[in-house]
Amino acid sequence: MDMEIKENAIYTTAETEELLKVSESTLKRMLKHGLLRANKVGGQYRIMGKEILRLVSPELEASAEKVYMKLKKKVVEKINPW
């Protein structure tokens, strides 16, 4: 079942897991590491649709790849002299 992610809608963690097709533990890690921003309401997370859309956007993927390659280069430069 495909669901359209609405930018101004508010989603529960269960709905977000279904939309992103990730497990509960993966979503918890994403929230913990700040990859996905959320607000806590009554002890439960609520996630804005625009946050989910930001996460799956091609721009974010390109940005993440750039950061990864920069980090990889630093690691290689550090390891090579050994």
Image (cartoon, helix red, strand yellow):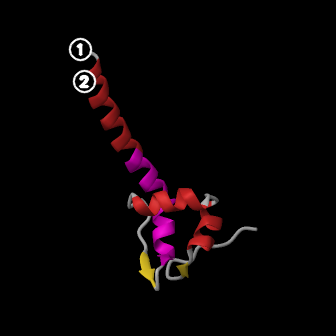
Above or below, comparing residue 39 to residue 78 in the picture: below
Q: Residue at x 46, y 80 (%)?
A: 43
Above or below, comparing residue 40 to residue 21 in the picture: below
Magenta span: chief secondary structure: helix
| Image: magenta residue range | 44-64
Q: Which residue is mark 1?
A: 81
Query: What element does badge 2 sit on?
Result: helix
Residue 77 occupies quadrant = top left
Q: Residue at x 55, y 78 (%)?
A: 11
Q: Position of residue 19 (x, y in %)?
A: 63, 66
Q: Residue at x 51, y 67 (%)?
A: 52
Above or below, comparing residue 76 to residue 37 in the picture: above
Q: Nearer the viewer, residue 42 or 69?
A: 42
Q: Which residue is mark 2?
A: 78
Q: Which residue is situated farthest in the front direction here?
A: 43
Q: Which residue is situated farthest in the right direction here?
A: 1
**Is mark 2 in CB contact (under 8 Å) with mark 1?**
yes
Q: Position of residue 30 (x, y in %)?
A: 46, 59
Position of the C terminus by quadrant: top left
Q: Which residue is situated farthest in the top direction here?
A: 82
Q: Amino acid at mark 2?
A: Lys
Q: Is residue 44 left or right of residue 23?
A: left
Q: Amino acid at mark 1?
A: Pro
Indicate which disc residue 13 carries. Answer: none
Q: Residue at x 50, y 62 (%)?
A: 28
